[in-house]
Amino acid sequence: MLCAVCLLPSAVRKCYFGRFFLPRDGTFGILFLSHFTLAAETPMPTTLTSLPSWTALKSHADNVRGQHMRDLFAADGKRGERMTLEAAGIFLDYSKNRVTDETVKLLLDLATACDLKGKIGAMFSGQKINKTENRAVLHTALRAPKGAVVTVDGENVVPAVHETLDRMSAFCDKVRSGAWLGYTGLRIKTIVNVGIGGSDLGPVMAYEALRNSATRVIQFKFVSNIDGTDFAEATHGLDPAETLFIISSKTFTTLETMTNANTARDWVLSKLTDPGAIAKHFVAVSTNAAAVSKFGIDTANMFGFWDWVGGRYSMDSAIGLSTMLAVGPDGFREMLAGFHEMDENFRTAPFEQNLPVLMGLLSVWYIDFFGAETVAILPYDQYLKRFPAYLQQLTMESNGKRVTLDGAEVDYATGAIYWGEPGTNGQHSFYQLIHQGTRLIPCDFIGFLKTLNPLGAHHDILMANLFAQSEALAFGKTAEAVKAEGHPDWLVPHRTFPGNRPSNTILLEKLDAKAVGKLVALYEHIVFTQGAIWNIGSFDQWGVELGKVLAQKILPELQAKDESGLHHDSSTNALIRRYRASRG
Ligand code: F6P
């Protein structure tokens, strides 16, 4: 049917003339049979894959796929210096990617078409961008300087953030100095953080990352798993009279954490017997004061945060109490300053100088136009050994989504699988597949110019390996080069490296608290950039609910004495019966 206004087929869906001349409510719809009217009555959201910048990237990718990085470098002697970016003290070399200047331009066009700028502004200004939970997303307010104003529901949240930081600092000073004593008058020698997911992974990662500057007078343990082994091993050999538990849970209802917290209370009371001892050996970090109080922890010993802090974005809130206890209030504030520096780059820098935007777009390039399913995170620093695990929750719980914010199923790939290990260990494990396997795995190499443990030539060897790996991945080794080494023909394919395997190299001066803040904020905003392009809700996590509900249903079935009442599928029923039989 043709539009009565512009005479184009109504399948085009939008009448640009009618838009100006017809009322928006479609009153003239029947009269004019205009496709403008149809669009006005049933608005059709523009899909990502129909954006001109997306289709341009698609055809551009067909072209780039045929090019080798060897040729790109040969054609531009300055590529390795040009395709770099330095912001907030982080240097990024992105030249070893399968991109041209045109790729970067088209990716930036895509970001503009997806209103990334507007979306960044919406987050920083406290708009409720977490639609399915009707919440603001304001982890950036946790590191805002004291005088800043960030408003949620008409209230500036920054003063409360700093008030909590001050309370945390006072508490940490007491514990670290020995002024805080246990129930029997002994000093605290061990701190055990009990939490899971975002209430564990950030604290563990930060503790490991900052171990070099952490107090050695107090030891830190982390209990997360519901598996009793985790609690038993963490507390093995400890004296309850010298142990302080931090029960970290945003909701204070999480099954694993509450079970471990109850076990911890029993463990403490098994020696100290008086329930009054709880006040000296338990503190809580939560948004749920009522549940904390019900558990028996005095809310004077509770450090709060807010519903606008997502669990996986909370390591810089009071959830970081163990981090502050380890590195001290000044160290913690240094870390927050690092976060803030990166926030400012993300919030204010033009996209071409914006580190998280550029890295986020590069990941979209591989995930959506090269079919990459994973991203490898390869920190060349032993202190960052838990960084890949931390990023797994940040990236996959955020962007593991299959519908857009409007609830429509996506017709493009979203969140990739993030994984990794520190170098050089990974080299002797899985790098083989990255070099010669059939999959394309973009890698982020993270290194530090200065080591915190200068021991002989260790650091030079470590960094030589980092640089060698990205070089080998990009340029490989041709069959001709292998032949020229005198290898027999049959061996040549086995010893050939195809190369053309992409990587980013990220360099920082040294691994201090500020660097940790910068790195975490960098990836937080990479995740945001990806989610903004994909138009998905990066800040909820409904996908973890179903398993939790089913576990609650199965638990009494495992413990039941009678054989009746199993209504699962035949596999689940049989597994439950086998478990019951083993319990006798
Ligand atoms: O795994 C789901 C989840 O809700 C995470 O998002 C969160 O970090 C974790 O559980 C722990 O939740 P809480 O801090 O409320 O115990």
Image (cartoon, helix red, strand yellow):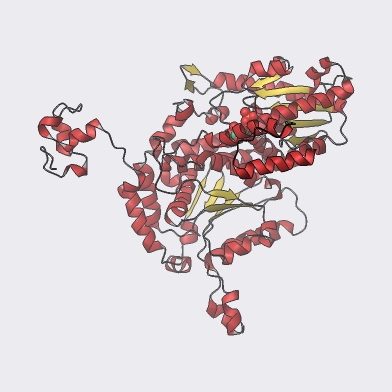
Can residue 331 be seen by looking at this rendering?
Answer: no
User: Residue 77 at x, y = what percent?
Assistant: 46, 65
User: Residue 304 at x, y = what percent?
Assistant: 63, 21
Residue 111 appears left or right of 497: left
Residue 135 appears left or right of 245: left
User: Residue 22 at x, y = what percent?
Assistant: 14, 30
User: Residue 27 at x, y = what percent?
Assistant: 16, 26
Q: Residue at 69% x, 62% y: name it.
A: 428
Residue 396 appears left or right of 108: right
Q: Residue at 80% x, 22% y: name it.
A: 281
Q: Residue 584 appears in which quarter of the rendering?
A: top right
Look at the picture and state if 106 lies above or below 64.
above
Q: Quadrant of the N terminus?
A: top left
Can residue 582 be seen by looking at this rendering?
Answer: yes
Q: Residue at 27% x, 34% y: name it.
A: 43
Look at the picture and state if 376 lies above or below 410.
below
Taking the image in four quarters, ligand 1 sits in the one at top right
Q: Residue 6 appears in which quarter of the rendering?
A: top left
Q: Which of 263 and 80 lies nearest the eye of the viewer?
A: 263
